[in-house]
Amino acid sequence: MRGFLGAVVDQVKLALAIRSLLLPRPQDMERRAKAKEERFRKLLQYAYDNSPYYRKRFEGIDLKTCAITDLPTLTKADMMANLDDIFTDRDLTRAELERFMGDPANVGAYFKGKFAVCHTSGSQGQPAIIVQDKPAILTTFAAQFARGKKLSRRFLPYIQQLLYPARFSIITQKPGFYPSSTFFNYFPERARRYIKLQRLSVFDPPEVLVQKLNEFQPNFITSYTSALETITRELKAGRLKPSSDLEQMTNISEPLPEPVAERVEKAFGVHITNVYSMAECMALTCGCQATHGSHLNDELAFLEVVDSNGNPVPNGTPGNKVLLTNLYNLAQPFIRYEIDDIVTMSATPCKCGSLLPLVQSVQGRSKDQFWVNVKGEIRDLPYYVFLLALHNETNLAEHQFVQTGVNRFVLRAAPLPGQTLSVERLRQYVQQSVTAEGLGNVIHFDIEIVDRIPPEESGKVRRAKNLFGPPPATAAELETTSTAEAG
Ligand SMILES: [Zn+2]
């Protein structure tokens, strides 16, 4: 009886959470702003009362009236150095969490029956441990169901869903404690009857992916850009036979360049939504149904786009990093948490009609930002300058640009199966593109033809990779360093 009642209570909780997150109408905006303000104050007070770290950091700040910009920021290094004190529940300790995640049998289990856990990979710098409470997990699902438009249409008519559950393929890695697995590791029992999940790994050979997708015939496919490109090639080659009721594809975790999105959409004939989120705030956005941007679930988080000095940048301008405040996870408060992503917020309302702010583009990590020295002036070099060069190369399967030195770059290019690539032709395309930017005599690049671009340990592929390092503040400094190194 307890089990039955528990299930009903869970079902009602999920339904209420979904209802509260249905897309806002103009008349809802004032009420939403007030609710957000309340949630923000509650988070600050909760962190102060329960986290020894935040109690110290918030000393002397009036948490009832302060502006968000009055609060200190938090780096990942700081967080990991003080992890036990950041947690708001003394049942959480780093040592125990690490032991728990060391046992693969614990994937999908709640730590001490209460907390969902994951860790980011070390390939992006220092790994971070992320803990979410059960209400946070519920909020993440509710946001996705309420605002992933096609899902909500399929999800809400419960009866229909019981008869025809949507088939949902996720191509990431084998289930594990990495962030993009978390959503599916903790997929609630009560949602499983509406959705059939198929989990595939980007490390599977393409022929295995194709066979499994052909068998399962998904309505929805979620993956990284690089894997969506792989299955697009398989479709074009006639090996992948998608379902005629494929409704939507979704990109997560990797930046989605516009030309790639267009190619995938044209091949499959469905819209590709693009979700910008991270383990620290999995409900941050939902993909826009009309563009390749992502709509901020702005009652659940603050996302401040700032320059390298932490000053806000206007909408329409790319920032250097973002400061994230997660308003719905009380177990491990993220308050003005620094994330190394180059994000641009849209300066105009979205054409889809949503009233939620639009994350127009995410170019990836600022650490991978390219730069050049043009006659003593240090300049950022957007990756799209190179990307544009590759539009004309129809034999190209995959690519990666790497900065290896001052004004030195390498293009790694992999041909489509059975095709060949010409180094000379690729060189011509890249040369044309950089010349159009006025950099024809500035940039030196080498071209390597490879069989494939291997994914990082995380399963993702970085299309733009800076192996050399960040730009110096001035070109003069660069010369000093080079001379010192040479000596
Ligand atoms: Zn939109």
Image (spheres, rainbow, N blue to C red):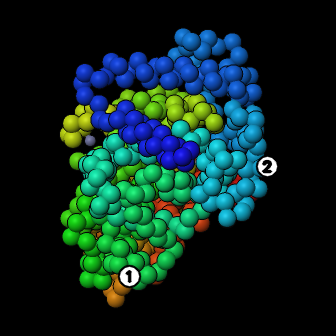
Residues at badges 2 and 1 in contact (C-beta under 8 Å)?
Answer: no
Q: Secondary structure at mark 1?
A: helix
Relative image position of residue 115 (x, y in whole percent): 63, 45
**Which mark, by number, is residue 95?**
2
Residue furthest to the front in view is 1
Q: Is mark 2 within 8 Å of ligand 1?
A: no
Q: Residue at x 49, y 51 (%)?
A: 188
Give the residue at x 40% y 78%. 212
Comparing 46 with 481, the one in front is: 46
Residue 244 seen: yes
Give how far apart the Cα atoms at labels 2 and 1 are: 41 Å
Query: Sequence-wise, which precedes: disc 2 or disc 1?
Result: 2
Ligand 1's quadrant is top left
Instruction: Pick out the residue farthest to the bottom.
Output: 418
Identity of the residue drawn at 31% across and 72% down: 217
Label 1, residues with CA under 10 Å away: few <14, some 14-19, many ≥20: few
Where is mark 1, residue-wise? Answer: 211
Q: Is mark 1 within 8 Å of ligand 1?
A: no
Residue 381 seen in render: no
The amino acid at mark 1 is Gln
Q: Residues within 10 Å of mark 2 (few under 14, many from 20)?
A: few
Q: Specify whether 79 is left or right of 307.
A: right
